[in-house]
Image: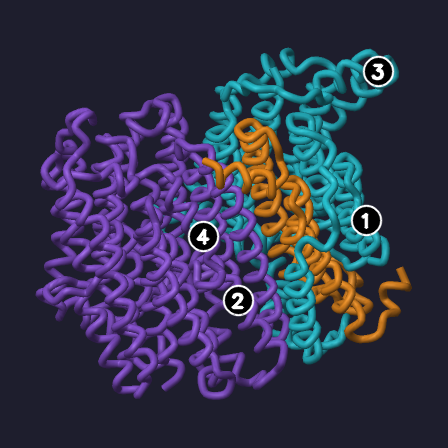
Amino acid sequence: MAALVSSHLPALQVVLALLAAPVCLLLRRPNASWAVATAITWTLLAVSIALLERVLQSGTIIYALGGWPAPWGIEYRIDLANAFMLVIVTVIGSAVMPYARASVEAEIPVERIYLFYCMYLLNLAGLLGIAITGDVFNLFVFLEISSLSSYVMISLGRERSALTAAYRYLIMGTIGATFYIIGVGMMYMVSGSLNMADLASLLPDVGGSRTVMVALAFITVGLGLKLALVPLHMWLPNAYTHAPSVVSVFLAGTGTKIAVYAMMRIIFTVYGGMGVFDDFGLGEMLMALGIIAMIGASAVAIYQDNAKRLLAYSSLAQIGYIVLGISMASVFGLAAGIVHLFNHALIKAGLFMALGCIFLRIGSVKIEDMKGLGKAMPVTMAAFVAGGFGLIGVPLTAGFISKWYLLQAAIEKGWWLAIIALLISSLLAIIYVWRVVEAAYFQDRDKKAPAVSEAPVSMLVPMWVLIGASIYFGINATMTMDVAIGAAEALIGGIQ
Amino acid sequence: MGIMAVIGIAVARLHNLFAVVMLTGIFSLTAAVLYVVLDAVDVAFTEAAVGAGISTVLMLGTLALTTSEEKPHYPGRHPWALVLVLLCGAALIYGTLDMPPYGDPTSAIHHHVAPYYLSKSAGHTGLPNVVTSILASYRGYDTLGEVFVVFTAAAGVLLIIGRAKIGRRRTRRMAPGELSTSMRQNVILRVVSKLLIPFILLFAFYVQWHGDFGPGGGFQAGVIFAAGFILYALIFDIDTARTMIPPHITRFGLAAGVLLYTLVGVASMLKGGTFLDYSVLAGDPVKGQHLGILLIEFGVGITVAAAMISIFFTYARQER
Amino acid sequence: MDVINGFPGLMNYWIVVFLMMTGFYIVIAQDNLVKKIVGLNIFQVSVFVFYITMGKIKGGTAPILADGTEIYSNPLPHVLILTAIVVGVATTALGLAFVVRIRDAFGTIEDDEIQAMENED
């Protein structure tokens, strides 16, 4: 039995989540479906860690689905890059589950909770499916599973704007997916293959074909829509602001991150041998967009009155950092981007959890309503401050580590503009984090406002686990950095 | 294709949403005809059933629940939209310049993976329909994902508008109820439908089991089955239709289909193959493949039919 | 039939591009929420036509094996598009469900009016 499980770990990573979703639909009980979802998510965490360990020990794992070897069948191809992504997604998912119970009960009608967990599991399966696959069309299918379920989950927010946010996300997301399949179609047309590794070896023979380059452009724009790369970000602030708290936590930690991964995979693995950075100025273009996001979105964040929207704009800026890392096209820059992807997932999920706790108690996340919460909800607000330090990049937080490496990579490249942008963006982060801190600690709560107590332990513990982890990885960064460098090497292998 | 272009422009200009939806249906049908010309019979079948059938029904349902007239706007509100579209179009045209000419048998697309399917699939799965072989076996995992997309959509619709009480009704609009009342009173319609529906349902079963040999398969069968049922509900009585297949049955079917599909995959893992490797399911690999394909196609059929019926009833319940 | 087969080289693809862009224009330029979804449908169907077109081989037949036939059109694009059609209808169903709820919450399905209302909120 153990040998059986061990040989099918890659399949189990996705299949368990897929199996659990219809089971939740059949159960129809809120608590039972929560229990199933939690058990499955934690099992998936164990699976992803086991996979990561195996990849670290013995290299890339290939698993042919249906027993048909690629390129005829679909294969999973797990190297350090996707093994690390699987861990990120399952870590956030596992932390979200215990947190979700109280928060979901408060925000979603009880007769629909089982459907909510069904959607959550589908979303998880979709994200894992994207990370694990080695086939460009299969990536599209799982992208759609995760996207459709995200639209549904976002629409469950209390305000009516949640509906329009979900609708607009659906339109933008579907345009993105359609652009992606246009690109995939063009690649397939000139090469005859859909397998990533196979494409990587076939495309250089096609050479500088205009079709291949337009394909890359459409895929980049399509995925850019999904990962909310400025200026394709319009859907994100509303979606994160109006979604139920748990959904904001989960999506902020995983959704855009997986799209970033997909973009890395296409650019570096599939197009690795094409010299897209030297000949086509892709690096400069991405760098420009990354910098605009880092400064522009941070500046907009300062003027937000709603703390959730503030964090959403901050997320756009952080995506800018990761894209900056991609644009450097060096192992070190990419590794810095990947580490930031991981660190930011922890920090942002933790911060959104803090806001979820606040929403549970005061029913609002407007900054003006958060006055005096430093005294009323000390544990929650302390977590927010610690996470905020991470966003700024204060030493001894994970945010510092990733910014530090990005800075070094930029110096190595001699990109002074990027270095200045990093500094300005960090200064702006101080301002927007300060706005919340000021309200919570230096202003008193309205006398008339009802008394507020601390959030339940079931929500505080997961929040502090994530925030604590982000501090731990700020002090001891060897492990994450080693994996990230390995992941970057795996991705970039085609170029060198 | 010319017809499709004209329809596309008409859709952009028209304000009556009923006309727009109908034109979209015709657009899909034209596309289906084109697919037949281009040898894609399975795709044509599906496009006709889905694009022209299910999508149109859903859109009409939405119009009945909302409004059928678009508010007039002054033209040229979004100048940037045209610029963006022209830009994308130019990029695509630029991209086509290095494409192999249409129908060229020497182009790369026809020489890498495709010949393998065409020459080996009969030996591997024993099925003459290569599309079914690829869909259900070589790329069976994609199809699993696709069924889960349908599952997600059906569960999502249930979550979004299921049992929600629609409150305000400010403007008057034609409800499907009225539409179906007028249909219900039409004797010819009733008689013809009564004769037709059993055949539609029978045809669905035929398509389900015949997909291995001719065009068709679980997905098309599921859609046709659902369509026959929806026709019954529209022309006779939604309530009777719902008592025939109550919500808990559709919900069960929804889950059972995807579970069946996934469990076939799990069974092949237990029998020593990889996930969805049907060859190990029976003593002889070809028989195993055949068994696996039959089972998963059945799973697809159940989930798709249940999903379509569930989505339709969720819409229909809105109007009262 | 011959009209389609008679097109020289790339003409087919150019028409497909035109169709795609018509759909894309409807999605981004229209304010009516239902029409946006119609546009999305047209956009997607055009992409499907693009895939099927590239799979065609002149003189080929449908990829259902039969004795006496030598050339078959490429079956793989057909499979991909079967999947994509299903994904498309799933998206449509979900999008329309949102439209129904939006109409209920805002009393309109025109995007500019909704935006005006949201700004007041």
Amino acid marked by disc 1: Ala
Q: Chain of mark 2?
A: A
Q: Where is mark 1, residue-wise?
A: B10
Give the number of the disc on residue B191: 3
Q: 10 Å neighbourhood of mark 4: few (<14), some, or many (≥20)?
A: many
| Chain B painted colour | cyan
- Residue at coordinates 43% horizontally, 80% vertically from top-left? A283
Measured in 3D between alpha carbons, the distance from the residue under mark 1 to the one under mark 4, in whole angstroms, is 48 Å
Q: Where is mark 2, residue-wise?
A: A219
Measured in 3D between alpha carbons, the distance from the residue under mark 2 to the one under mark 1, in whole angstroms, is 30 Å
**Which of the two discs, 3 and 4, sits closer to the camera?**
3
- The image quarter containing residue A153 is top left
- Mark 2–mark 3 contact, CB under 8 Å? no
| Chain C painted colour | orange
Q: Where is mark 4, residue-wise?
A: B277
**Which of the two discs, 2 and 1, sits closer to the camera?**
1
